[in-house]
Image: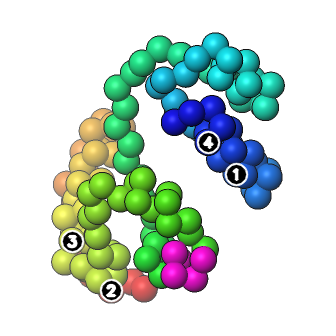
Amino acid sequence: MDGHRWSALFEELRNSRPTLPVILLNAHGTIPDAVDATSRGFFSYLTKPFDMRLISGTYRDLDAAMAEGQFREDFYYRLDVVSLTLPRLNERREDIPLLAAHFVHQLARKYGKPINGFAPDALEALATAS
């Protein structure tokens, strides 16, 4: 990505949402790009190549957001390499006892407390809560 495109993206994000933290990574920079970046408000600039994996997630329906003009199509296609759709927890209530057991055991280990699990009524309350 050349300096003009990434700096334009940075400017657009900074102008449209001034309080939004923006992190842009560019592995193929030059000294003039670094000077340009710092003069435009970048905090730091890394010029060495690196290996990166990005995992992103959202609760929004991005297809609908794109159709309504609320999410940029070019961002979507840059991010959408592998999509996993995970149903909301209230649509898979059978997972609640497994998740609850996992977290209670994790906390028991962390705090050194002997917790064996949940009372059946407590699990029922968790599984039926809205």
The spot of residue 47 in percent (x, y) is 53, 16
Q: What kind of residue is marked 2?
A: Thr
Is the C-beta separation of discs 1 and 3 under 8 Å? no
Kind of element beneath mark 3: helix
Q: CA distance from mark 1 to mark 3?
A: 38 Å
The spot of residue 39 in percent (x, y) is 80, 25
Residue 9 visible in the picture = yes
Q: Residue at x 58, y 17 (%)?
A: 30
The spot of residue 60 in percent (x, y) is 48, 73
Mark before the other along the chain sequence, 2 or 4: 4
Q: How many other residues sit within 10 Å of disc 3, few (<14), some (14-19) or many (≥20)?
A: few
Label 1 sits on residue: 13
The spot of residue 37 in percent (x, y) is 71, 27
Q: Residue at x 47, y 25 (%)?
A: 27
* Front: mark 2 or 4: 4
Answer with left or right where residue 36 lies relative to residue 129: right
Q: Tell which of 33 and 23 is nearer to you.
A: 33
* Front: mark 4 or 3: 4
Q: How many other residues sit within 10 Å of disc 4, few (<14), some (14-19) or many (≥20)?
A: few
Q: Is residue 96 magenta?
A: no
Q: CA distance from mark 4 to mark 1?
A: 12 Å
Mark before the other along the chain sequence, 1 or 3: 1
Q: What kind of residue is marked 1?
A: Leu
Q: Which mark is residue 5?
A: 4
Q: What kind of residue is marked 4?
A: Arg
Mark before the other along the chain sequence, 4 or 1: 4
Q: Which mark is residue 37?
A: none
* Front: mark 1 or 3: 1
Label 3 sits on residue: 95
Image-quadrant location for residue 16: bottom right
Magenta stretch bounds: 65-69
Mark before the other along the chain sequence, 2 or 1: 1
